[in-house]
Image (spheres, rainbow, N blue to C red):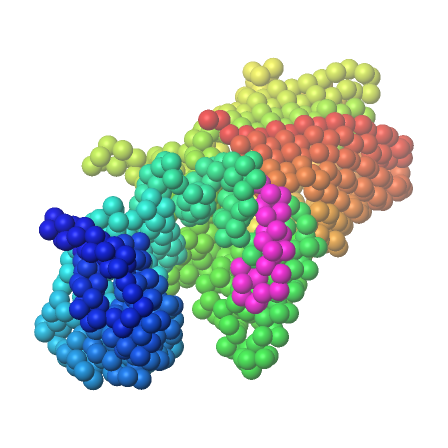
Amino acid sequence: MLVSISAKFFNTRAIILLSFFLLHASNAAVPQKDVDALILSTKGNLSAEQLAPAIEQLRAWHLDDPQNSHLVYDLAVLLDRAGDYPAASAFAPQIIKNDAQVYALSAIAHATLKSGHFQEAEAAYQLLIAKTPDDINAHVGLVYAWMGQKRIQDALDYAQRILPSREEDYSVEQAPMLVALAELFEQRNDWVLAASSYQKVLQLTPDFRYAKRQLVFALSLAGIPYLANFYAKRDLSIFTKEEQYQLEHADIALTIHFGEAQLSSDSARSRVNTTDIALNENAELIRQPEQLTKSKFDRIVALDDRGYMEEAVLIYQELMAAKIAIPLYVKFAVADAYAYLEQPDKARDLYLEELAELGAADFGTLQKIQIPLIYAYCDTGQYREAESLAEQIVSNQAKLAEHNKTGASTKSEDYLRALEVAVYVQKSEDHLNLAEERLTTLHAQAPFNNDIRTSWASLLLARDHPHAALDEYSMMVLDVPSSLDANIGRGEILLSQNELSQAKNILPPLIDNYPENKVVLHYSRQLESYSQPFYRIETTIGRGAAQGGADSVASAIIYSAPFNLEPNPESNEFATDSWSSNRFRLFTQLSYAEGETVNNVNASRSRLSAGMDYRASDITAEASVNHTVNDNRNNGIALAMSLTISDNWHTRAAVDTNIIDLPAAALNLGVTAKQETLEIDWSKNESRKAGGELSSTQFSDSNVRDFAHLWWQERWISEPVFKLDTVLGVSASTNSQMNLAYFNPPHDKELDLDIKGDWLTWRHYQRSFKQRFDFSVGQYSQSGFGSGATAGLRYEHEWAFENELAFTYGLGRNFHPYDGEREYRNYIYLNLSGRIK
């Protein structure tokens, strides 16, 4: 309250009078006029210190005249005014019992309420209301007395009964009751109703500081931090710097939460708008000197949501360097960022920390961390740990389903997700038979679950059934056009089938809607890589028995970027949707063959080719013309075509009128040859394949060599690190001419068994290093010379660096009988392929 100049003057006189009465007080009965004069001297806004002399005088008079009730009343009033509520409350029984005057009841009601004697306060206010039923403050006091006794419903009912039934009838005098009503709602944690009551108070008294503050805090506790912050910014002066920060932080935190909801439910580019707003607001907040660490926590989460993983990890590392404890939800975001940045070991460690901190929690909470941990295990090659954890999740969900009596056809989403992740682990372990068994049942139980459909399509692709996988992905795109997995899966298969234009058409909406998505970015790089020129170099250097061909051969071929042949007359550009769209490449090839005759004469031949390559779904074809560099008379053409009949059957046919991979003696004598080849392969899946080949080679010396070969491949060990296959092959050949300079038996045949091992030594996502060995044994039979054993051993390394570069090198040794004599061959080789940017 404001104190006027006259009031200050009056207070000074009151102190002088008070001192006079203290100096002249006697032990006789106190004249009423002296009491009245004393009380009159205390009128105004005196402090507790200023009231102290009057209170002491009243105490003295009360001791002298304990039966004087007016002294009790006046003393209680002054003690209440001085804020000595416990001392004032000591007179409550006497004042309430005597049904004192209104001023005394009002004081004692207030004092007992303030000192926490709520039952005495209730009694005093009840008496006061009986005497002054229109006193709104008495009614408010009774409400607070009941509130203190935790009689919230009684107080609430009473307050609502006292208030006018219509809000438009509220006046300023109802403001205290509205405040009490708001505080009752706060007691019940009804923060929205509390905020509504404070809002009504402010409509009556716009400058009421307490109501302004409480409105903001109630809105914040009601989960409406944006509105709380909005009202706080109207009058920041009534909030401390820390309160302003807390309100701003809560507002931004909720915006981040809304951004996450939008990211998960929206597939358009606009889905990142809310998160971007949160990041911008957070950037301003953390620049303030008062900012607290939790703003950086929120920023890490938002950066992870937005795909800005480098910055998220950088802030995390700064916090760790400062030895700041990181909460679980932030660790989860950082682990996700590490996984995105292809640092799965760090992601794994953070997930494990989170699980250790959680301890025993419900299955759903644990599963949210365990599933990404499983992916991290797979990415770090810890397949046993991944499998164990995946099966544990499935077991937990099975127990939960049994407890809830959930039938197989109505499994929860968490249960289905657990099974789908277990299948993913089995696929990662190359246990594809087990994965197919489980997924077949799961797919039948939940045929419209998109995660399971995606897993099914992925499994079909892993089992060498790209057409079936493409059909599944295409159906998913029709059913759920916004499905990222379905679109990416479909695009990658189309690209593998050389449908570049269709695959490219998938990318623009994905880039537009998911610019930060790692899978989309990887797909974009695949398209870019396919669209580039590429090269392939194959070199084998050998010495020894290579009677069927040259000792050493080498080939280097360069392909152009794909282009169209059909122009678009309207735009004068090549069409993008025709049969020729991005299907043709030009290529040039240099081939070299070299050998040493039995007379130690070196002979070699080089061939230069130029041609066109055509690639479309299920068909590839090449046509080229060639010229023998060291013999101007030898020119030829080469035609080749591969056809995919189905996921199980593939065939290839080729004609080359000028082959140079000939025995050294034939090269030395200038013999040329042409060859026709027909191959057909059958594949059940990646673990069982078979095939056959027929070829006819016509030499320029009139010899015709016919060759046939059949083979069967079986996989016996299929693990993520090691695989073991066997290939059983049988072949036979005939030559029409006898006794030529090069090896040409009339009839021969051979039975071979190859044992092939593949060891994945190192892998980091799309980069890998493999070691391979190939051990072969067999029996060779040649007409006129009987039969003899064959054997060979080969060892190689393979390095792969995503889509950019791959190279293989190795060495080998074998022996083979020719004309009854065992001959040995040693060789080394290097194969290299890559893209030209």
Quarter holding the N terminus is bottom left
Residue at 70% x, 55% y is 384
* Residue 362 seen by the camera: yes
Residue 383, percent across and down?
68, 52
Q: Based on the displayed image, in which of its 4 quarters is residue 342 positioned? A: top right
Looking at the image, which is closer to me, 450 or 796?
A: 450
Residue 97, percent across and down?
31, 84
* Residue 680 seen by the camera: no
Q: Is residue 352 magenta?
A: yes
Looking at the image, which is closer to me, 382 or 64?
A: 64
Q: Based on the displayed image, in which of its 4 quarters is residue 395 positioned? A: bottom right
- Residue 135 in the figure: left or right of residue 440: left
Q: Considering only vertical position in the picture, is 206 above or below 668?
A: below
Callout count: 0
Residue 487, percent across and down?
41, 52
Residue at 51% x, 72% y is 412
Looking at the image, which is closer to me, 467 or 645?
A: 467
What is the magenta range? 341-368
Q: Is residue 227 magenta?
A: no
Q: Main secondary structure of the magenta part?
A: helix
Residue 161, percent across and down?
20, 82
Q: Considering only vertical position in the picture, is 13 above or below 30?
A: above
Q: Considering only vertical position in the picture, is 559 above or below 787?
A: above
Q: Considering only vertical position in the picture, is 434 above or below 4?
A: below
Residue at 72% x, 24% y is 541
Residue at 10% x, 72% y is 168
Looking at the image, which is closer to me, 786 or 275?
A: 275
